Amino acid sequence: MTKSILVVDDTRSMRAMVAAVLQGAGYEVAEAGDGVEALELARQRVFDMVVTDHNMPRMDGVTLVRELRKLPNYDPVALIVLSTEASPELKQKGREAGATGWMAKPFDPQRMLDIVGKFI
């Protein structure tokens, strides 16, 4: 069964790049433009992983992680934040919200696939 990944980023080109890398490795990818849209999709179906930007309108990545962790089916799901911001304080907030990991932008495609492969 193909694993599914929800990619969340308010920048269309970044979503497309991440999606292309993941689809090229055989994953099914859904996309959302912000945390609100992502949460709506996550309530409709359970993804095997979520990769989210942090700085987005309407709902940031850490808030999205916190909201996803409130959904019963998302307890075991890997939630990765992919952001240009990587301060220790923000990473700690991400961990406290329930993030599984944090990746810095710009991302290395092979490193992303290695991380995804570890969790799903």
Image (cartoon, rainbow, N blue to C red):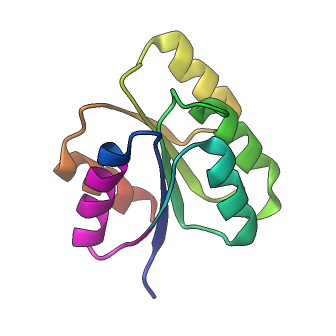
Residue 39 part of the magenta segment: no
Q: Report the number of discs.
A: 0
Q: Would residue 39 appear left or right of 70 to someone viewing this image?
A: left
Question: What secondary structure predominates along the stretch shown in magenta?
Answer: helix
Q: For residue 83, which quarter of the picture?
A: top left
Residue 103 point in image, percent of width and height: 37, 35
User: What segment is highlighted magenta in the picture?
Assistant: 15-29
Q: Is residue 66 above or below residue 37?
A: above
Residue 35 point in image, percent of width and height: 63, 43
Q: Residue at x 75, y 63 (%)?
A: 43
* Residue most extreme to the bottom: 1
Residue 27 point in image, percent of width and height: 36, 73
Quarter of the image with the C terminus is: bottom left
Q: For residue 44, which quarter of the picture?
A: bottom right
Q: Residue at x 58, y 67 (%)?
A: 47
Q: For residue 41, which quarter of the picture?
A: bottom right
| Along the line of sight, the residue nearer the viewer: 42 or 91 | 42
Residue 10 point in image, percent of width and height: 47, 40
Q: Residue at x 52, y 47 (%)?
A: 33
Q: Would residue 106 appear left or right of 64 to someone viewing this image?
A: left
Q: Is residue 97 above or below residue 51?
A: above
Q: Residue at x 46, y 43 (%)?
A: 9
| Along the line of sight, the residue nearer the viewer: 57 or 55 | 57
Q: Is residue 61 above or below residue 40?
A: above
